[in-house]
Image (cartoon, rainbow, N blue to C red):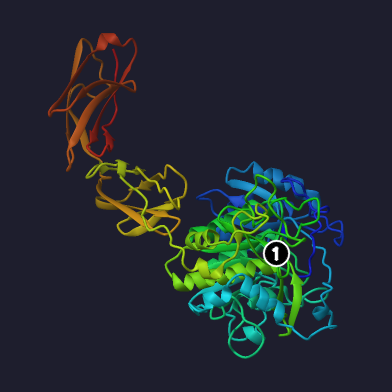
Amino acid sequence: MKLVPRRVVVAALSAAVVAATAGVSTWALADETPDAPVRLVVGLKSGVGTAAPLGAVSAMGVREIDAAGPAQQAMSALRAQTIEVSPARKDRVIAALKSNPDVAYVEVDRVRKMTAVTPDDPFYTGKDEDEPHLPLQVEVDNVRLPEAWETTTGDAAVKIAVVDTGVTKTGDLADAVLDGYNYVSNTTNAADDVSGAGPNGHGTAVASLIAGRGNNGEGMAGGCWSCKIIPVKVLDKNGNGYDSNVAKGIVYATKAGAKIINLSLGGSGSSQVLADAVSYANLKGVLVVAAAGNEGGTTHETAKQYPAAYSDVVAVGATGRNTDQRAGFSSFNKSGDTWVDIAAPGVVAAMDRYGNYHTGWPGTSFAAPMVSGVAGLIKTVHPDYTGWSMQRALLKSARPISPSGWVTYGMLDAAKALTIATDPEPPTLTGLSTPGEGWRMHGKVAIKPTGIADPWSGMRNVDLYVDGIYKAQDRTAPYEFTYDTTGRNGKVALEIRAYDKAGNRAVFKRSITADNILPTVKITSGPANGATVSGTVKLTATASDANGVRTVEMLINGKVKQTDTTAPYNFSFKASSYASGMKVQVRATDVAKNIKYDATRTYKR
């Protein structure tokens, strides 16, 4: 899916040309030739190598897009890969991939187009430049940023990612922008290159609202003017980008240390790769903020937009200039919906990629970074806050507005947001139902925690550590693991770490003994192999194990006939009970349930 930046020049997005339902192919764009390749995103099941699914379709002309470098690394984190195939072979490739047991999902990496209009604001057109900073000042006051700045203006240690058209290091952003990455061209040049109709540099304008340097006697002040920006370019020079590139950008930003990710982009319809990327960021404690969309005034004005509509994403709607009223272009909640969370000013002043300042740029694109900037202030005051904690502070502090309901919580209140507490209590974790303390075990061990719950922020993930080393993670109740002890013998320290969304942790430890050494067992008396037997046949066996023998059993023709638990191990059977030949085995099971068989003896009547 290609996502559209919520540009300041956009009054509404055109959804009529976009397929919103899953399974609809939308590769064919108006400006593409009929044989333009189709991009597919292939999700892989756990434990599957990234090359496995491509083997079956390699002969169909499939080209892997993310074969190496940061793109491959980002997609690997999501257990997915992006490929291209010709339109004529698309259906066969999709069918082949879906029938592959290693594949979790296949979806078209759909393209979204945007329609843009130039704002008629007098300052933008150059007709009136008398008060270029007044609109921004009014909007800043409306969300109580000056009061928040009395507490903090941010911290350079707080990194906020702008996943967008790139960010140019200019003007008030000259010393605010860190190194980033460009997933459009797969280079390290993450500068903004959007020009033409509308704002010259969508990502730069977004970044200026977040971290434009304040109190320097020039330009403008962003919400968190001491914070740093990580630029990640996922939208091309026309402001369009594939879902897979946006997903890569989210993963990159998370790995680069971003604590807040701003997504001033969106579109109708969800995709698995985008949802997985948001979940990846949430799991790492990152707050994701997204524009709710500019569908106001269209037949899609209340339709959910993504990524804004995902859970654990702060979806930001826009108010008009100098008012709490919804901006006409902003998407909003219909009755019964709650996906648009919070409002922020959506007609603002911002800086373009040339370092010039403009007022009157409308769009939820610029409401979202105002929220991201305040999130940066929250993270500065509360460095231990996770994404959930920052989200709670933003929403809990929101100022009620009238009419209510078009957003769930109200208007952004920067000063109050700094005062909201987080969940201080760890989750519960009562123990393990299996294995028990000190159990001797071999092979694969089922590990089943008990009593995991969190009544406030909710559970985020449960991790398994073995001898202090991370081994596995589960994000879904009942949070169970399998640990393979093969090759190990001796003490094994198991540790379960349960985390809630606020980052609180509960720990439970248990020690077991790995025993993968087989016992010994041998028939010491009885008829020799191949003998003809009659009457009552008697056998005696010996068995030993360093940690103890649990049982010794006699099997005839594959079925257990007798069990003995005390040495020497004596067995007997009547030959007349078997009309044909008898295959007799003796096996020993030790306390760790390792099993060893002695050689089979075949008898005749």
Based on the displayed image, in which of its 4 quarters is residue 589 positioned? top left
Q: Nearer the viewer, residue 532 or 148?
A: 148
The residue positioned 33% from the left and 9% from the top of the image is 579
Q: Is residue 204 visible?
A: no
> Is 68 situated left or right of 352 in this image?
left
Residue at the farthest front position: 402
| Coordinates of residue 202 in the picture (x, y in percent) | 72, 73
- Label 1: few (<14), some or many (≥20) within 10 Å? many
Q: Position of residue 439 (x, y in %)?
A: 24, 42
Query: In the rendered image, which quarter is residue 359 located in?
Result: bottom right
In the figure, 426 relative to 432: above or below? below
Percent x, y for residue 299? 80, 50
Decide if residue 534 is in sight here: yes
Tell me the quarter of the image containing the C terminus. top left
Residue 422 at x, y percent in the picture: 43, 60
Q: To which residue does mark 1 refer?
A: 319
Q: Is residue 503 left or right of residue 271?
A: left
- Residue 134 to residue 21: above or below: below
Amino acid marked by disc 1: Thr
Residue found 63% across the figure and 83% down from its top: 173
Quadrant hosting residue 521: top left
